[in-house]
Image: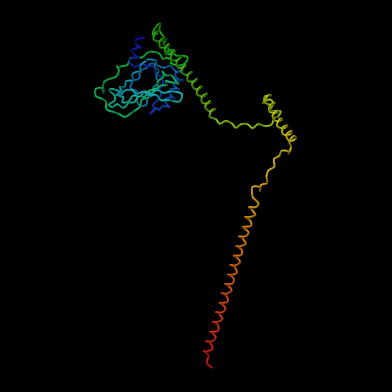
Amino acid sequence: MASQLQLAQAEGLCLRYPENLGLHREVNFDSAVTMLLRAIQMATTMPFTWGFIDKPQEGQVILIFIPNHSPFPNDGIRYLEQEVKYNIPAGMRELEVYEAKFGFAPGVDQTAWRVRRRYRLTKGGHPQLILMHYSRGQPIAVPPQFLNQPIRVYPLRPVTEPAVFVCGDKTGQKVYPPGMAPGPNVGMGMGMGIGMNMQQQAMLAQQNNNMEILERKRERERARERGASMAPRPPPRVEEEDSGDEIDMISTKALALTRYRRNHDIMNAVFKHAAYGGKYTPTFPPPYSIFNKTELEDKTNQLSAEIAALNARAIERNAAKALAEQERLQQKAALAFDLGDASMENLSDSIVV
């Protein structure tokens, strides 16, 4: 039985999640991380069944469990290009992605249009749980020599192995159908090997989770330290007068020193005034002592003389202006008188008696 199971595994037999996960047109990285985290919880309550993956349809999502150092199972599809691997950071986790393009099912597809992506959490999850998604990509022509050449042997072997828990406290425990019990020593070696391997994987996953929790805790502590160092410091507190309520918060030495300094300053001011008073008060010069009185008087006299001369000139100009105005008025009056006499003479000549 063990040899038959090993042969079947070489042909692509693997542990699959038994329920249908539905059809999805596309699965992005965030959705893959969410599904893999949910798969850890589902695997603890649902045993995985042995089965083959053969020519999945477009949009199908499959969840499988692969033990350490085990090859990826054959899915009945031939891919014309080599599978590409890349890692995607997802916060505290790391998502590993394998992408294979230009796949076709020999004898079924005429063009290579299938795309397979398989995801697993290498950090922050269960690395043996693998999520696969099949989608449609850009089709290309299939070389004639591969068009009808199968990639696996048909028909596929029948599977009678019972389901197995792959995660949780029941890791490695088999679940037999009703009415079927394990025979004596039948498949014991292979079952114990799988159970031991799964227990080691469960312990590894638990250790991985513990390391992730510790790393999160360190990140939070470092973030708090950075925030505390970058936060603005509060302004210094203004010291107030001593009061009875503050005695419990201030040490005796600090309180005594403060009172001594305050009393010393007060007594120093009192005795300084009593001893010296106003004896040695310096005499400050008057504010106008920086000016020369004689020089200021000379400048004042000079300015007064200039003002008097300007006033005299102004009076002369005004008198001359008044005299000129008077003469102009006299000339205007005389001219008006002459014109009046001339007009009367002309009028008398024109009258006939």
In this view, the residue farthest toward the top is 184
| Front position in the image: 183 or 198 | 198
Q: Residue 254: percent from the left, percent from the top?
A: 67, 26
Q: Quadrant of the C terminus?
A: bottom right
Q: Residue 350: percent from the left, percent from the top?
A: 51, 89
How many numbered discs?
A: 0
Query: Residue 108 sits in which quadrant?
Result: top left
Q: Considering only vertical position in the picture, is 294 above or below 108?
A: below
Task: Look at 35% across and 16% down and name the residue there.
Answer: 71
Q: Considering only vertical position in the picture, is 30 above or below 49?
A: below
Is 110 displayed left or right of 251 in the figure?
A: left
Is 204 displayed left or right of 347 in the figure?
A: left
| Front position in the image: 98 or 325 | 325
| Front position in the image: 149 or 295 | 295
Q: Residue 321: percent from the left, percent from the top?
A: 58, 69
Query: Residue 273 sits in which quadrant?
Result: top right
Query: Residue 344 sits in which quadrant?
Result: bottom right
Is 74 displayed left or right of 261 in the figure?
A: left
In this view, the residue farthest toward the left is 144
Q: Residue 147: percent from the left, percent from the top?
A: 26, 23
Instruction: Name the colour scheme.
Output: rainbow
In this view, the residue farthest toward the bottom is 353
Q: Quadrant of the N terminus?
A: top left
| Front position in the image: 66 or 176 | 66
